[in-house]
Amino acid sequence: MSIADTFGKAEAEGRAVLVGCMPAGFPSVDESIASMVAMAESGCDVIEVELPYSDPVMDGPVIQKASDIALAGGVRTRDTLRIIEAVANAGATVVLMTYWNPVERYGVDAFARDLAAAGATGMITPDLIPDEAGEWIAAADRYAIDRTFLVSPSSTDERLAMTVAQCRGFVYATALMGVTGARTAVSSQAPELVARIRAVDPEMPVGVGLGVGTGAQAAEVAAFADGVIVGSALIRCVLDAPDRGTGLDRLRALSAELAEGVRVSKTS
Amino acid sequence: MSAPALPDLAGHFGRYGGRFVPEALVRALDELDAAYRAAKVDPVFQERFTGLLRDYAGTPSLLYRAERFSAAIGAEVLLKREDLNHTGAHKVRNVLGQALLAKQMGKPRVIAETGAGQHGVASATAAALLDLECVVYMGETDTERQALNVARMRMLGATVVPVTNGSRTLKDALNEALRDWVSSVDTTHYLLGTAAGPHPFPEIVRDFVGGIGIEARAQCLDKLGRLPDAVAACVGGGSNAIGIFHAFVPDEDVRLYGFEAGGDGVQTGRHAASITGGSAGVLHGARTYVLQDEDGQTVESHSISAGLDYPGVGPEHAWLHDTGRARYEPVTDAEAMAAFQLLCRTEGIIPAIESAHALAGAQRIVPALTEELGRTPTIVINLSGRGDKDVHTAGAYFGILDEVETIVPGENS
């Protein structure tokens, strides 16, 4: 399903989209596929596959650790594409989250081509701003990949408008000034940021990420956003589990809890 | 000749530089850019900066004719004595400039990354002087290797945070500083330690350390009545090199040489020579030359010199390399240490191991340069730092630490 259809369907159902993130190859290629399929089966509408990178400056300790484990296990860019293909073939809507250098190294056009062929519908770029993205924007258009840039509470109105205008599919609103990782409370800056995005473009779906880790928090965010993005809390299910079966059980349970959260009726 | 007009307004040196950062940092970078442009033309700021450089840091640094070293390598060598600056390296110029900018922007806190600890010590120094809170990120491996510098930073009132992720060295300290900055931009200035990172850092750092080249150029004209044939500097991130190169870039007859850390030799893969042994990519906010694998994952660097042990390089060097204006060559650990010893023995100057790479590189280019010119070449070498911090490393390298230890009273009883 395309990103637009996924958000359209959720809107019709009066709920938000649940986006669940997992690094490719963590803790191994096959196990990461199993994790992602379990997440999709248990209520994640979109699987955000993160390409493990040696220097993930937007990521907090949990994703860093998972990425390190994946890289230490020898995961390659082509493995990430293979994982995307497997998860998309299992019926999930898949987007990729990747830092820019691995894409540039692969070749921007070739990467867009192979990403589309693997079945990903979109790509999130945490360290690529539209100002530097000319080549990526052209390639994403060429292969019909939705491109998601980040906006932040610190973005000026001018940058917010410019960035949203370059997004396709959805825009990623970072709920707070910080890196990825679950927090005890949802950022108070998030509703205001979403409102500012709506003022610029009422049609563009807004996904909110950073700091969401429980069903209650998902419900809180779903009340004002179109999508709820959860990473570290899901990854921790696998990271902290004593064995693989327990990890998958916890992953299914948390996905279901979050899916229930995004279905708590909207207040707005 | 027209002055170099780079970077452009978006921070590009040709295809290099720019901003590859999370959107959350863009506003802070824009504010920094605006504050810097204002400071550039603000006579009060400039007087404060030049006043501190003169009265506190001890610049202009001397340009010293090193006669015995010259005789040993067959060239006329002039050493730009940045090692005599307060805190012992060129870095004090950059930290004073940036700390003043932080004050100007009303930010009470500065953060810095450090490898060997030199930039951390310099940052802690400037923060103490200008009454700023200072947090220094340092790879855990480096805090263990450089315990004395950790103590120095703490004496100066800074908080040192050991970084325990990734390879636990400089690159990871830089990642952690960026993560702190994403969370704290409202109150915090990131005092970046080299002429790298996202725009406007490469330009700001270059300009703050650019006095090295401006002084050296004037000192050459004063002492020799002409410009040198070549200028040589070591290149890690590249701040001391860009600092001495920049004023000479329009002087096309002056050859510019950057010497990278060749470690065990570029062919072994154990090195930190990003330009001569790496490829174009994006790291820490800019497009430049980086050490990376086939997938664009950063590869760990290796050098005997902690200050050069970094898998990237400032984007202006990438551009100077591609345009051919400057030449970059690797210098191995062994070559650098031989030059280190030569300077100690001929001039009574213990150089930083970083700077020893420039000494060794200069030594290497003498025969070809002599042949090309048909006379003895005149070479300005940036002696970017002093070697006190390297005594342990050098002592171990030359195998002279045991002798020292055995004469400690009580040790042999």
Image (cartoon, coloured by chain):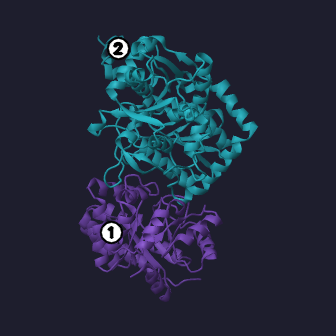
Where does residue A247 sit, x and y in percent of width and height? 29, 67
Residue displayed at 33% across by 33% down: B263
Mark closer to the observer (1, 2): 1
Check residue B323 in the rendering and tell me which mark sits there, or answer none.
Answer: none
Report the residue marked by disc 2.
B404
Q: Position of residue A225 (x, y in %)?
A: 54, 76
Quadrant of the image containing the C terminus of chain B: top left
Q: Chain A, which colour?
A: purple
Q: Colour of chain B?
A: cyan
Q: Which residue is tagged 1?
A: A114
Q: Quadrant of the N terminus of chain B?
A: top right
Does A39 sit left or right of B61 as displayed? left
Residue A197 is situated, as x and y percent measured from the top left of the image, at 60, 72
Tell me if A253 is positioned left or right of A11 in this view: left
Which residue is rendered at x = 30% and y = 17% of the image?
B402
The amino acid beneath tag 2 is: Val
Q: Nearer the viewer, residue A82 or A68?
A: A82
- Neighbours of disc 2 within 10 Å: few (<14), some (14-19), many (20+): few
Three-letter code, disc 1: Asp
Query: In the rendered view, would you say B13 is above or below A128?
Result: above
Chain letter behind tag 2: B
Q: CA distance from mark 1 to mark 2?
A: 62 Å
Which one is in front, B47 or A72?
B47
